[in-house]
Image (tube, grey):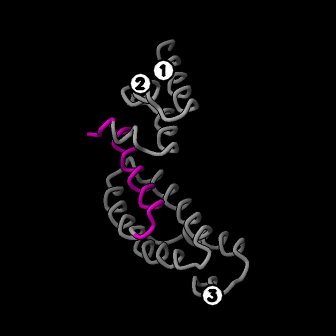
């Protein structure tokens, strides 16, 4: 079943599952097209949720390697009209910089979403974890960072 046929299915649960399956198996050259087509679904909450799961899965696979940067550029273009999705792509890039010890700005981390702060608070970059232990947005983020620092110092 192609994406056009999926868009005709009235059950958003069926479409969501099918979108996730198609996105998981899409060939790299067809990824932008498929993401763009999914985002034409009239149920924008469901469509963006499917694309968000795809972005998270792909970014998690790609961020340590050299293919990430080209993927980021194409996904930035594909999500430019969807602020939440575009922000997630940017935040994966910040996570990549923090994790791989590339240049990054503490203010960018402190201005980021709870999702990124929590993901980073549980990470290995001591500088970032210390920043979040002191100034993370939520108590959960600060506690996660403090716990990580305590485990490091006792190891």
Quarter in which the N terminus is drawn? bottom right
Along the line of sight, the residue nearer the viewer: 26 or 86? 86
As drawn, which residue projects farthest toward the left?
Answer: 103
Query: Secondary structure under badge 3?
Result: helix
Q: Is residue 141 left or right of residue 135?
A: right
Along the line of sight, the residue nearer the viewer: 90 or 1? 90
Q: Residue 5: which disc? A: 3
Q: How many marks?
A: 3
Q: Residue 124: which disc? A: none
Which callout, 1 or 2, points to the residue nearer the camera? Answer: 2
Image location (x, y in percent) of residue 72: 36, 60
Q: Residue at x 48, y 72 (%)?
A: 35
Query: Secondary structure under badge 2?
Result: helix
Image location (x, y in percent) of residue 50: 58, 65
Residue 145 part of the magenta segment: no
Question: Given contact means CB atoms under 8 Å apart, are the residues at marks 1 and 2 in contact?
Answer: yes
Quadrant in the rendering for residue 9: bottom right
- Alpha carbon separation for disc pair 1 and 2: 7 Å
Magenta region, main secondary structure = helix
Q: Residue at x 72, y 71 (%)?
A: 13
Q: Residue at x 67, y 69 (%)?
A: 17
Query: Secondary structure under badge 1?
Result: helix
> Which residue matches tag 1?
149
Write down the region rendered in magenta: 81-106
Image location (x, y in percent) of residue 124: 43, 30
> Which residue matches tag 2?
130
**Chain-order first, disc 3 or disc 1:** 3
- Alpha carbon separation for disc pair 2 and 3: 50 Å
**Chain-order first, disc 2 or disc 3:** 3
As drawn, which residue projects farthest toward the top?
Answer: 154
Image location (x, y in percent) of residue 128: 39, 31
């Amino acid at each position: 079943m192609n994406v056009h046929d999926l868009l005709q299915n009235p059950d958003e649960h069926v479409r969501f599952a099918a979108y996730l399956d198609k996105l998981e198996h899409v060939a790299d050259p067809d990824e932008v097209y498929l993401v763009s087509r999914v985002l034409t679904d009239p149920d924008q909450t469901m469509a963006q949720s499917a694309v968000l799961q795809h972005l998270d899965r792909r970014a998690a696979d790609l961020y340590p390697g050299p293919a990430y940067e080209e993927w980021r550029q194409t996904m930035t273009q594909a999500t430019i009209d969807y602020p939440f999705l575009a922000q997630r792509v940017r935040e994966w890039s910040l996570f990549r910089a923090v994790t791989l010890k590339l240049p990054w700005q503490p203010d960018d981390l402190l201005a980021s979403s709870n999702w990124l702060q929590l993901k980073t608070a549980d990470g290995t970059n001591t500088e970032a974890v210390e920043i979040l232990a002191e100034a993370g947005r939520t108590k959960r983020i600060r506690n996660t960072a403090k716990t990580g620092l305590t485990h490091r110092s006792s190891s």
